[in-house]
């Protein structure tokens, strides 16, 4: 694990030329990459040194009451039902594990930052959607761990970060919400329209943020290709993309909104998760029942 956030310029060099040019242009015209909170930087240093004293780690996390509250909310999910209830951060670290707790802290840290004075409603809808997809991804991973070898904390991290390029583009382009129709019920980003109107790709921007925050490489790749699982081939990130895409579809079903991408993606997603179309309805019911029972 890197001890510091990777520089944006260093990350940009790993992009294809077209993507690197887009990122350079967006940064030059005011797009801001969110910095990691101080608590997260302190925690990263301790984890990088293989600190195992949960009292020390818990003291760092407890410095940020808002982040701590969100962490308790996440571990209230039925994905961690075997360990509940949790009374202290130390108990979370003992039961969930240090690396796993660090992943969860990174996820909730991202969702707790950012300026929402403009387009407040769109931001609130965005983060509500991201939290729901993160929680659903966590439950899918828990159910399919023997097939995918993806752990709930990793899936939650990918679920929260997968669309994190969107709020950055909302900040950069005042008309982004209106053009992408983000205020309309059941409408989400059309990649072709995004490219046409803004010469931008929220997947590439999200990958930049994930790399800057030093997320595991396969999660960064899953964020980059979460709309293009077929481009991954045999890749460590493929199962993660499948989990995120099924979480998105289950969220759409739960909200009774359409998911026009599902028909294109399900032929790659379901086999990756060891599921058939016939078995899917029962699996969805299981996930939604657990989702609804979250503390």
Image (cartoon, rainbow, N blue to C red):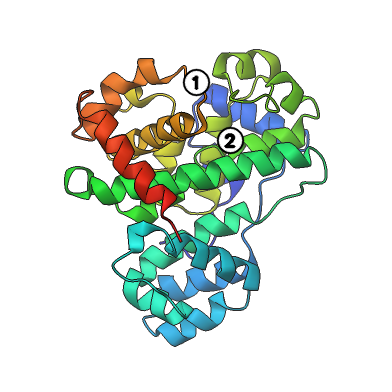
Q: Is residue 1 above or below residue 128?
A: below
Left or right: 160, with 63 as reference point: left
Q: Residue at x 63, y 35 (%)?
A: 166
Left or right placement of residue 124 versus residue 39 in this view: right
Compared to 230, does 13 lie above or below? below
- List x then y, in percent, for residue 134: 46, 46
Q: Secondary structure at mark 1?
A: loop
Where disc 2 sits, the SS reads helix
Q: Quadrant of residue 234?
A: top left
Residue 215 drawn above or below residue 235: below
Image coords of residue 144 (percent x, y):
23, 45
Q: Which residue is mark 1?
A: 258
Q: Nearer the viewer, mark 2 or mark 1?
A: 1
Structural crowding at the residue carrying mark 2, measured as other residues with C-alpha within 10 Å and reported as few (<14), some (14–19) or many (≥20): many
- Residue 170 screen position, x and y as percent: 72, 34
Q: CA distance from mark 2 to mark 1?
A: 25 Å
* Mark 2 vs 1, N-terminal side: 2
- Look at the picture and state if 91 lies above or below 285: below
Closer to the camera in the image, 181 or 252: 252
Q: Which mark is residue 205?
A: 2
Q: Is residue 112 visible?
A: yes
Q: Residue at x 52, y 24 (%)?
A: 257
């Amino acid at each position: 694990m890197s001890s510091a956030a990777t520089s944006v310029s260093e990350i940009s060099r790993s992009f294809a030329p077209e993507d690197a040019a887009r990122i350079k242009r967006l940064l030059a015209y005011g797009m801001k990459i969110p910095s990691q909170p101080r608590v997260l930087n302190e925690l990263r240093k301790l984890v990088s040194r293989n600190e195992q004293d949960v009292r020390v780690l818990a003291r760092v996390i407890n410095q940020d009451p808002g982040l701590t509250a969100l962490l308790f909310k996440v571990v209230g999910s039925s994905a961690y039902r075997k360990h509940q209830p949790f009374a202290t951060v130390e108990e979370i670290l003992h039961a969930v594990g240090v690396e796993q707790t660090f992943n969860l802290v990174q996820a909730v840290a991202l969702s707790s930052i950012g300026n929402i004075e403009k387009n407040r409603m769109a931001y609130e809808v965005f983060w509500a959607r991201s939290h729901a997809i993160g929680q659903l991804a966590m439950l899918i991973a828990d159910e399919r761990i023997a097939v995918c070898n993806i752990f709930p904390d990793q899936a939650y991290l990918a679920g929260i970060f997968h669309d994190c390029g969107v709020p950055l583009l909302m900040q950069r382009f005042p008309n982004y919400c209106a053009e992408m129709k983000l205020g309309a019920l059941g409408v989400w980003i059309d990649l072709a329209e995004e490219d046409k109107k803004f010469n931008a790709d929220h997947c590439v921007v999200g990958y930049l943020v994930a790399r800057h925050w030093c997320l595991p490489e396969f999660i960064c790749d899953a964020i980059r290709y979460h709309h293009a699982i077929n481009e991954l081939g045999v890749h460590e990130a493929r199962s993660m993309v499948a989990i995120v895409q099924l979480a998105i579809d289950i969220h759409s079903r739960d909200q009774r909104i359409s998911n026009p991408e599902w028909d294109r993606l399900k032929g790659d997603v379901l086999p990756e998760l060891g599921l058939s179309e016939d078995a899917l309805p029962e699996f969805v019911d299981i996930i939604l029942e657990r989702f609804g029972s979250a503390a």
